[in-house]
Image: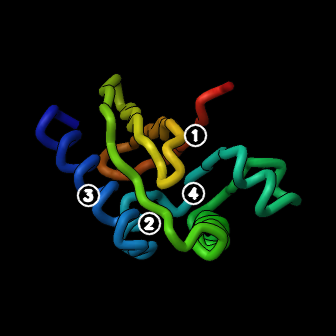
């Protein structure tokens, strides 16, 4: 992705999350996506923090949206790499986090939610 495509992705990402539009968020993920998150380990204990496949990702994020009905993100910055995009954001509680997303063409095939340690 080029700089314009990266910015457009980040803008859609935050808009879709803030609208709690799970279908729109999931449009950007491949069916075989692998996603890791400390929250997944808490909300879907059997996952061990690793979510495999778009259907499982929908289930995980559905649980998350129910657990956090006031969910809201504010993008602080984004960082582009080779087939990789990092979105640095603050959540509704003021906590800073990142999503590290790896793409195969236009779709995310691997993602990692990371939270500020400390």
Q: SS class of the residue under badge 4?
A: strand
Q: In the image, what residue occupies the spot 44% across and 66% down?
A: 26
Kindly report the distance in space between the C-alpha atoms of the residues bearing marks 2 and 3. 11 Å
Disc 2 + disc 3, Cβ < 8 Å: no
User: What SS does tag 1 mark?
Assistant: strand
Q: Earlier in the sequence, mark 2 or mark 1?
A: 2
The quarter of the displayed image where residue 60 is located: bottom right
Q: Closer to us: mark 2 or mark 4?
A: 2
Q: Residues within 10 Å of mark 1 (few under 14, many from 20)?
A: some
- Residue lying at 66% horizontally and 45% vertically, measured from the top left: 36
Determine which residue is flagged by label 3: 12
Q: Which mark is residue 32?
A: 4
- CA gap between label 4 and label 1 equals 15 Å
Residue 27's x, y, as percent? 38, 67
N-terminal of the pair, mark 4 or mark 1, is 4
Q: Mark 2 sits on what residue?
A: 26
Residue 117 position by quadrant:
top right
Mark closest to the chain's N terminus, 2 or 4: 2
The residue lying at 83 percent from left, 49 percent from top is 48
């Amino acid at each position: 992705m080029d700089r314009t495509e990266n910015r457009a992705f980040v803008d859609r990402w935050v808009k879709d999350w803030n609208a709690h539009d799970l279908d729109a968020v999931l449009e950007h993920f491949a069916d075989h996506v692998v996603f890791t998150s400390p929250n997944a380990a808490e909300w879907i204990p059997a996952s061990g923090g690793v979510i495999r496949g778009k259907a499982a990702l929908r289930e995980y994020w559905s649980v998350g949206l129910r657990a956090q009905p006031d969910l809201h993100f504010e993008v602080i910055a984004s960082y582009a790499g080779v087939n990789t995009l990092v979105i640095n954001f603050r959540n509704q509680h003021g906590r800073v986090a990142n999503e590290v997303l790896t793409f195969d063409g236009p779709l995310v095939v691997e993602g990692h939610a990371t939270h500020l340690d400390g």
